[in-house]
Amino acid sequence: MGKLRSWRSNNPNNYFAPRFSVDMWFDLIDVDLIDILLREVKKNEYLYEGDRWEHYNIFTWKSDAIDQLRDIIINCHLEFCKELNIEPESLWVRGWVYPQKEGMHLKRHFHAIHENSYLSGNLCLTENKTTTDYDIPYLGMISVNNLKGMLTLFPSSLPHSVDMLKDKERYSLAFDLITEQGMKYFWNNNDNESDPLLLAVKL
């Protein structure tokens, strides 16, 4: 059973008072499936050379484990929407692997910050002592331990980073969820033939 965490501003009493609302979803996936996913991820190590995250989509791989992961993400998204009392969207997905090695860190970044931004996700495939730090507007960083099997859904616009790895390696699986409306806007307005979003598939 997943868990919702939320951060909200008080109702503003004037134009300049802060307004923010951030919701995140946390769940733990069975480690047996995680181990299978990790083996499949490592078999495709050549894809990640030179940080080539934008040239493939793991959700196109023919794999029972990836199919199971898709079902888990769909169910987590449905639970997330139910907790927030919002109608779930029809979704597309693109995913990649971040193979963090000893001494590396992931700088503060966000996945999308536009009118069609939706949700992104992170799934930790290895046991390590790092945290993913999410920058909540006005409030600052919250640190989430990167436990093996931890699946996190968060707004794609939310900045986040990972501290320096002191272990040998950390593999994580990242993905973006895009709404049907967002994909239609993209198809009608994109003129970049190498845009990673062209690799998205229906969830």
Image (cartoon, rainbow, N blue to C red):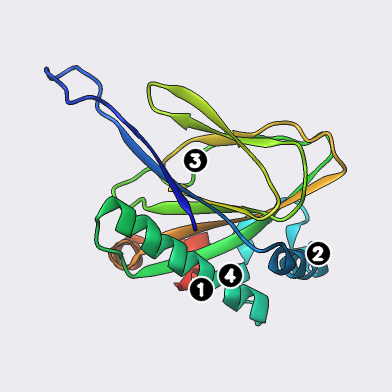
Say which residue appears at 77% left-offset and 65% top-offset. Answer: 35
Marks 4 and 1, how far apart at CA: 5 Å
Q: Can you say which quadrant of the picture contains the C terminus?
A: bottom left
Res 107 seen here: no
Q: Nearer the viewer, mark 2 or mark 3?
A: 2
What's under tag 1, amino acid-wise?
Answer: Asp
In the picture provided, is 133 more to the left or to the right than 176? right
Residue appearing at x 38%, y 68% in the figure: 91
- Per the image, the residue denoted by label 2 is 42
Write down the residue under mark 4: 69
Q: Secondary structure at mark 3?
A: loop
Answer with the quarter of the image where residue 182 lies: bottom left
Q: CA distance from mark 2 to mark 4?
A: 17 Å
- Amino acid tagged 2: Lys
Vertical side of 5 occupied by 91: above or below: below
Q: CA distance from mark 1 to mark 2?
A: 22 Å
**CB atoms of marks 1 and 3 within 8 Å:** no
Q: Which mark is residue 71?
A: 1
Which residue occupies the foreground of this view, 34 or 58? Answer: 34
State left or right for residue 168 relative to residue 85: right
Q: Rate crowding at label 1 as few (under 14), some (14 to 19) or many (20 or more) other CA atoms within 10 Å.
A: few
Q: CA distance from mark 1 to mark 3?
A: 25 Å
Which x, y percent locates residue 164? 75, 31
User: Whole-percent x and y of residue 137?
Assistant: 39, 27
Q: Which residue is mark 3?
A: 110
Lower position in the chain sequence, tag 2 or tag 4: 2
Is label 2 in contact with label 3 (beta carbons under 8 Å)? no
Q: Nearer the viewer, mark 2 or mark 4?
A: 4
Would you say the residues marked 4 and 1 are in contact, meaning their CB atoms lie under 8 Å apart? yes
Q: Nearer the viewer, mark 3 or mark 4?
A: 4
Q: CA distance from mark 2 to mark 3?
A: 25 Å
Q: Do the residues under discs 3 and 4 have CB atoms within 8 angstroms?
A: no
